[in-house]
Image (cartoon, rainbow, N blue to C red):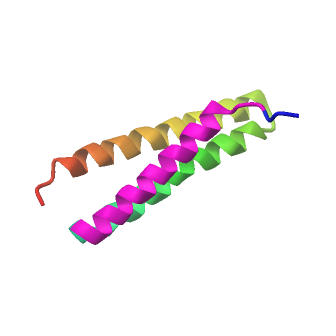
Amino acid sequence: MMEKEDIIKDKSMDFAIRVVNLCKYLKKEKQEYEISKQLVRLGTAIGALQREAMHAESQADFIHKFAIAQKECNITRSIKTAESHIPS
């Protein structure tokens, strides 16, 4: 039996991998550690929250978990954008 495609799961995993790679770059090339730690936490939380939502106890819980994941995504994007404007 073929497993059903899960676009959100795949994209959140791809995003987490990209964030981790970015953080490795920031640590190695820019000697930046604080933003990197925060980005890893936020970037990997998105997928974890998505998986939690799939096993939610209610529709309200499902919506709440996805809303939190969206907030984490927005914060991650804001930090990434701000970091790109900081001179090396």
Residue 57 percent coordinates (x, y)? 81, 38
Q: Quadrant of residue 11?
A: top right
Query: Which of the pair 62/85 is nearer the observer?
Result: 85
Q: Is residue 61 left or right of residue 19?
A: right
Seen in the picture, residue 28 relative to 50 is either above or below; the reply is: below
Farthest residue in the front direction?
1
Q: Quadrant of the N terminus?
A: top right
Q: Residue at x 16, y 47 (%)?
A: 85
Residue 14 falls inside the magenta stretch: yes
Q: Position of residue 15 (x, y in %)?
A: 48, 45
Residue drawn where x is 74% and y is 37% of the image:
54
- Residue 60 drawn above or below residue 79: above
Task: Give the answer, above or below, for where 31 lies relative to 48.
Answer: below
Q: Residue at x 82, y 33 (%)?
A: 2
Q: Quadrant of residue 23?
A: bottom left
User: Residue 80's x, y, as percent?
Assistant: 31, 47
Question: In this image, 82 relative to 11: left or right?
Answer: left
Nearer-the-camera pick, 46 or 64: 46
- Going by the picture, which residue comes out furthest to the left? 87
Chief SS of the magenta region: helix
**Quadrant assignment for the C terminus:** bottom left
Is the residue 4 above or below the residue 45 in the image? above
The stretch in magenta equals 4-29
9 within the magenta span: yes
> Furthest residue to the right?
1
From where the camera sits, is residue 68 visible?
A: no
Residue 76, image x, y percentages:
39, 46
Q: Is residue 49 visible?
A: yes
